[in-house]
Image (spheres, rainbow, N blue to C red):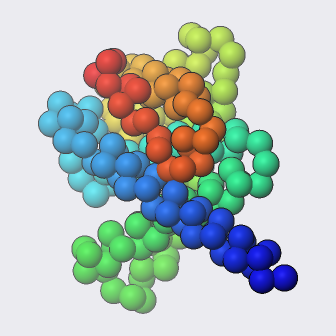
Amino acid sequence: MTGISIGWLARRRARKAAAGKAYAGLMKAALAPDFYLTGDVADTFEGRAGMVMVHAALALRRIKAIPGQEGARLAAALNTRVLDGFDAAYREQGVGDSSIARKVRKLAEAYYGLGLALTAALDEKREETRKSGVEAVLARNGVTESSRAAGLGAWLCTLADGLEAQQDSEILAGNLDWLAGAKVR
C-alpha cells in the first residue's frame, strides 16, 4: 500500500517540476526582447500577455497531443502556472485585491479564446490555409498589427512544427524546444 502512494507522490512531484520547467522556458521565449525591439509586438502589458498566451497555446497544443493521462495532467499543471503568472503580474502592477479576480478572469477568457482559435488554425491541413488562419488569429486578437501578422504567423507555424517533432518524453519532462522557430526570425 505504501509503494502505491509513494509512486503517486513521485509522479506528482515530477509533473510539478516538469510544469515549472515548461513554464520557465515558455516565459523566457515569450518575453524575449526580439519581438518587442522589432515592433512585431507592442512592448506593453497587453502585448507581453498576448505573447505569453500564444506560447502557452503552442505548449498546451503539443502537450495535449501526447496520448494518456500524463499529457493531460501536465497540460492542466502548466495551465494553472500560466494563470497564476497572470495573477502575479497584476499584483506586481499594484492592482488591488478587490479587482484582481475580475481582471484575471477577463485575461483568462482571452487566453482560452486565443488558445482555441490558434489551435484550430494550426490544425489546418493545407499550409496556406494554416498560415493565413494563424495570421488572422494574431491580428484579430490584438497580438500584433495586421501588417506584421505574416512574419509572426510564419514564425509560429515553424515553432509549432518544431514542437511537434520533439519526442513525447522530452515534452513530458518540460523540455520544450522554443528555438525551433528561431531560423524564421
**Is 181 displayed left or right of 123 in the figure?**
left
Figure check: 97 above or below 101 = below
Can see residue 115? no
| Quadrant occupied by the N terminus | bottom right
Q: Residue at x 49, y 76 (%)?
A: 102
Q: Nearer the viewer, residue 29 or 149?
A: 29
**Is 28 displayed left or right of 155 in the figure?**
left
Tally of marks: 0
Q: Measured from the top left, where is residue 87 in percent x and y? A: 41, 73
Q: Nearer the viewer, residue 37 or 77?
A: 77
| Quadrant occupied by the C terminus | top left
Figure check: 111 above or below 160 = below
Can see residue 151? yes
Q: Residue at x 26, y 75 (%)?
A: 92
Residue 9 falls in image quadrant: bottom right
Q: Measured from the top left, where is residue 123 in percent x and y? A: 66, 27
Residue 181 falls in image quadrant: top left
Q: Residue at x 46, y 21 (%)?
A: 158
Figure check: 97 above or below 115 = below
Figure check: 127 above or below 56 = above
Q: Measured from the top left, where is residue 51 in percent x and y? A: 38, 45
Q: State the residue lying farthest toward the left.
A: 37
Q: Measured from the top left, where is residue 12 in percent x and y? A: 63, 69
Q: State the residue lying farthest toward the bottom.
A: 98
**Is 176 displayed left or right of 133 in the figure?**
left
Q: Which of 183 and 173 is in front in this view?
A: 173
Q: State the residue lying farthest toward the right.
A: 1
Q: Residue at x 50, y 50 (%)?
A: 174
Residue 146 falls in image quadrant: top left
